[in-house]
Structure formats: C-alpha cells, structure tokens
Image (tube, rainbow, N blue to C red):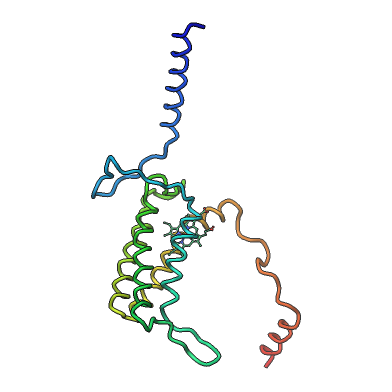
Amino acid sequence: MTLGDSVLKRFVTFAAAAALLAACSPQKPAQPAGPQLAAEAKLNTDLPMNELMGHVVDPAAFTYWAGSGTEETAKGVRDLSPTTEEGWEKLESAAAALIEAGNSLQLPGRARKLPDHPDSDWYQHAQKLSALGVIAKAAAAKHDKDAVFKAGADIYTECTACHAEYIIEPQLKATGPAKGNPLPDWPADVKARQQSYTAK
Ligand code: HEC
C-alpha cells in the first residue's frame, strides 16, 4: 500500500466515524425563545438522570421541605419553620437550586422522550419546577411560613407529576400492574391488634 493510499484510507475512516457521531449525537431540543448558547460554552451533561435527581434535585427539595410545615411528635406539634436568618437562607438556597435544576433538565440531551407524549411535556415539567422554585425562594425570603408550606407542596406535586408520566406510566405499560399485594403482610401480632381495634 502506498503512503497516499493509507492516508486516504485513514481519512475515509475518520470521515465515516464523524458521520456516525453526527448521527448519534442527541437532537437539540427546540430552543425556547431567549438567549442562545454562546459559541464558547461547553456543557457537561455527563451526570446521568438518576444522579442529577439523587444528588441535586432530591437534596434541594428535601432541604426545603425540612423547613416547612409542622411535625407531630410525642410531645405535641412542632413547627419546622426556620427560627434563624441562616435557617431561612438555607431554604432560599434550596429553592434557588431547584430553579437551576429546572434549567439543567432542559440541557441538550437531557430530555426523556416518550412514544405517546409530545416532547414539549418534558420541557413543561422542567419549566414548572423552575417557576415553582422562584415562588418558593420568594416565600422563604419573606419568612412566610404558610407560603413556604404551600410552595413545598406544589413542588412535591410537580415532582410526582413528572415521575408519573416519565417513570410510572412507561413501567406500567411495560410490565402491567403489580400482581397480588405488593407489600409484605403485617406481622401476626400487629395483625391481631388491628383486628381487635376494628372489632371494637
Ligand atoms: C422533568 C421531569 C422530572 C421532574 C420535574 C422531577 N423528576 Fe425526579 N426523575 C425523573 C426521571 C426521568 C427519573 C428516572 C431516572 C432514571 O431513569 O434513572 C427521576 C428519578 C428520581 C429519583 C430516583 C433517583 C435514583 O437514584 O434512581 C428521585 C429521588 C427523584 N427523581 C426526585 C425528584 C424530586 C424530589 C423532584 C421534585 C423536586 C423531581 N424528582 C422532579 C424526572 C423528573
């Protein structure tokens, strides 16, 4: 093989690989009207969805929920609202992280696709999360306990709405509903006590 041949061959292989890569690269989602990605920007979206959820979205949401509402204890009802400036600040930070999480969920390649739902559903869920984060942050900034509780509940509703569409529904379609009782039965002594209560 001449030198020319091998260079050409390598070039052809490279060109084929590039074409393949282009075909595999995730489709850019429809850009919402607004700022375009700068040419210099380089996004790192290596974090898989379960880790984005588990390490970013979930801790932020739990931090917010931990500072809202009340808890019933043996000693009575305990208010979970922050009592210090730092405590309220922590809720604001958690809400800010949720605003940004909504953005992260819309980065190229992140959106999940479903065969029987419009692609826009994913973006709407992500945008709702950011919008609720804005409300949640403002509520914490005002130290408004009731508004913080409501914002936390609305965030929870949105988490479960996206999960219902993108996790539960596809799973049910794939495997059908759980067969039998999905939970183990109560231990015999607990069951006996339950029966004695209902008998009264
Ligand atoms: C835009 C849709 C969307 C929204 C909104 C969303 N999630 Fe998720 N979430 C997902 C998807 C998709 C998965 C499944 C990831 C996978 O396939 O492993 C997931 C998985 C998770 C998991 C499981 C992670 C693991 O380790 O398997 C947790 C926990 C979670 N989400 C928490 C939340 C919380 C809390 C919120 C609300 C604050 C939220 N998510 C909002 C789409 C969403």
Q: In which quarter of the image is residue 183?
A: bottom right
Across the whole image, how many numbered discs are drawn on residues? 0
Extreme-left residue of the structure: 34
Q: Residue at x 70, y 86 (%)?
A: 195
* Vertical side of 70 occupied by 179: above or below: above
Q: Looking at the picture, how far across and down is residue 15, in whole percent? A: 42, 22
Q: Looking at the picture, how far across and down is residue 170, in whole percent? A: 52, 53
Q: In which quarter of the image is the C terminus?
A: bottom right
* Vertical side of 135 occupied by 56: above or below: above
In the image, taking residue 64 as reference, residue 138 lies left or right, namely left
Q: Looking at the picture, how far across and down is residue 41, in whole percent? A: 31, 44
* Vertical side of 61 occupied by 73: above or below: below
Q: Residue at x 41, y 45 (%)?
A: 109
Q: Residue at x 50, y 55 (%)?
A: 51
Q: Looking at the picture, how far across and down is residue 150, in whole percent? A: 37, 76
Toward the viewer: 183 or 144?
144
- The answer to whether residue 121 shows anywhere in this view is no
Extreme-right residue of the structure: 188
In the image, taking residue 12 as reference, residue 186 lies left or right, namely right
Q: Which residue is drawn at 50% across and 92% down?
A: 76
Toward the viewer: 177 or 87?
87
- The answer to whether residue 23 shows anywhere in this view is yes
